[in-house]
Amino acid sequence: MSRYENEDGVVTEASDGVVAYLAQVTPDPEREVGVGPWQGPWPEGDHWDHELLEHGDRRNVVDPYRYWKWQAIKADMAARAHGLHIAIENVSHDLNIGSIVRTANAFNVGGVHVVGKRRWNRRGAMVTDRYLRVYHHPTPEHLVRWAQENNLELLAIDNGPGSELIEKTSLPVDAMLVVGSEGEGISPALLEHCKRQLRIGQYGSTRSINVSAAAAIAMHAWIMQHGQSAPF
């Protein structure tokens, strides 16, 4: 066994072969990403970030948002947001929440709703939560009231008895997809308020797939039916 330290200083014990592999796939901290300082006269407009124009933009944003202030990106995304929302039960500070938020940002959903504990592990989000609305609901009942007040149909992503194949389902435009935490799934208190249960078609031996992967597939299923015609 050997000790491997990644670029964030996290130390892991693994076999020599695994350590060698991790060393090969770890990003080079010296490699520059994004774009450098703006070349030529600076563009005009309140959405431009002068510090980024001067020093370069190394953020994980699509090219049309290069050099923009993060507040301007958030406002532009909100103006173009889809009618889809996604809710996640936060039972145990699940690491998957960050990954789901990152995917929700990519699809520009109308909002991400964390149900239960307010604090969640943001590492997997890669700062993408800065650019979209993230709501907190202390209880399932609080989330249900919010969804009803905003005319959103609650749809559980769950492979339990009576669930329908999401690939063969006509999804509503104004929808809130609900996923549970890894292991526990969706709580009975929230599941009883979901109008339908939708499952993802599987063809192998495993009974279920990772919750962040399931959420991504479910969001994309909705995008395939109702997504804007001109993605970045």
Image (cartoon, rainbow, N blue to C red):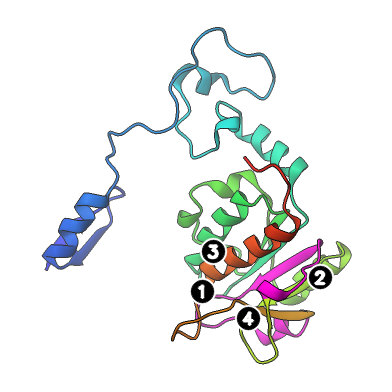
- Whichever of callouts 4 and 2 sits on the residue coming sooner in the sequence is 2
- Whichever of callouts 4 and 3 sits on the residue coming sooner in the sequence is 3
Q: Amino acid at mark 2?
A: Glu
Q: Residue furthest top?
A: 41
Q: Quadrant of the C terminus?
A: top right
Q: Is residue 162 left or right of residue 60?
A: right
Q: Is residue 178 magenta?
A: yes
Whole-angstrom CA distance, mark 4 to mark 2, is 15 Å
Classed neighbour count for the residue bearing mark 3: other residues with Cα under 10 Å, few (<14), some (14–19), many (≥20): many
Q: How far from the left and from the top, in percent, is residue 213?
A: 52, 67
Q: Residue at x 64, y 52 (%)?
A: 107
Residue assigned mark 2: 153
Classed neighbour count for the residue bearing mark 2: other residues with Cα under 10 Å, few (<14), some (14–19), many (≥20): many
- Helix, strand or loop status at disc 1: loop
Residue depth check, mark 4 versus mark 1: number of the one nearer the observer? 4
Residue assigned mark 3: 97
- Whichever of callouts 1 and 3 sits on the residue coming sooner in the sequence is 1
Q: How far from the left and from the top, in percent, is residue 186?
A: 63, 80
Q: Which mark is residue 192?
A: none
Residue assigned mark 4: 158
- Helix, strand or loop status at disc 4: loop
Q: Which residues are magenta?
A: 166-193
Of residues 122 and 118, which is closer to you in this image? 122
Residue assigned mark 1: 92
Q: Residue at x 76, y 57 (%)?
A: 226
Q: Quadrant of residue 33?
A: top left
Whole-angstrom CA distance, mark 4 to mark 1, is 19 Å
Q: Quadrant of the N terminus?
A: bottom left
Q: Residue at x 77, y 41 (%)?
A: 79
